[in-house]
Amino acid sequence: MSDLTHFDDTGASRMVDTSAKPETLREARASGRVRMAPATLKLIRDRGLSKGDVVEVARLAGIMAAKRTGELIPLCHPLPITSAQIDFIFVGDDLLVLSASVRVLGRTGVEMEALTAVSVAALTVYDMCKSVDRGMTIENVRLEEKSGGKSGHYVRAD
């Protein structure tokens, strides 16, 4: 069991001790997509939903989620996020692409914060639009890039 970083020699769960790691600038970018009916995407783009501006509410939800990731993922360290940004791109007539970028000067990476941010932002889009389109799908939530720390720079190949 000792090869598994989140378990001790007896198999008990533990948070990894990062106190000996150097603080470095760590960044991560994740993406996700929400596929929907063309009429729904038009309502979002035109800010025509009765619940308000879907993109801005989802952006705030994603930023808030990045800041609270340590409360949601059991063994994830709470981090003093220095930057969180959520971007939205309208693609074609039925797809909203979300991208979350998160930065921290710390001892552990922010991949989980970026993934959580994009996931919660996508869920917020769904929540705000479900009254007009219950058939929406959240797709391809994934890490695109990360830098900083011992494992170095990673960029998704595709």
Image: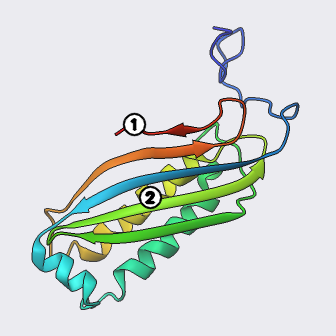
What is the residue that sits farthest to the right in this orientation?
A: 20
Q: Tell whether 149 sits left or right of 156.
A: right
Quadrant location of residue 138?
Answer: bottom left
Q: Tell whether 58 sits left or right of 96.
A: right
Q: Please, what secondary structure does the residue beneath circle 2 have? A: helix
Q: Earlier in the sequence, mark 1 or mark 2?
A: 2
> Label 2 is placed on what type of residue?
Val
| 10 lies above or below 138 | above
Which of the image's four quarters has the N terminus?
top right
> Label 1 is placed on what type of residue?
Ala
Q: CA distance from mark 1 to mark 2?
A: 20 Å
Query: Where does residue 55 sit, x and y in percent of width and height?
Result: 38, 78
Q: Does the CB distance between marks 1 and 2 fall below 8 Å?
A: no
Query: Where does residue 129 sit, x and y in percent of width and height?
Result: 24, 75
**For the point 66% across and 19% down, which residue is it?**
7
Where residue 118 is drawn, which disc sits there?
2
Rendering colour mode:
rainbow
- How crowded is the residue under tag 2: few (<14 C-alpha within 10 Å), some, or many (20+)? many
142 or 7: which is nearer to us? 142
Residue 72 visible, this orientation = no
**For the point 24% across and 91% down, which residue is it?**
48
Where residue 157 is drawn, which disc sits there?
1
| 71 lies above or below 56 | above
Query: Where does residue 70 sit, x and y in percent of width and height?
Result: 64, 49
Q: Please, what secondary structure does the residue beneath circle 1 have? A: loop
**For the point 52% across and 52% down, which residue is it?**
29
| 73 lies above or below 103 | above
60 or 25: which is nearer to us? 25
**For the point 83% across and 44% down, which residue is it?**
23
Where residue 96 is drawn, which disc sits there?
none
Give the number of the mark in front: 1 or 2: 1
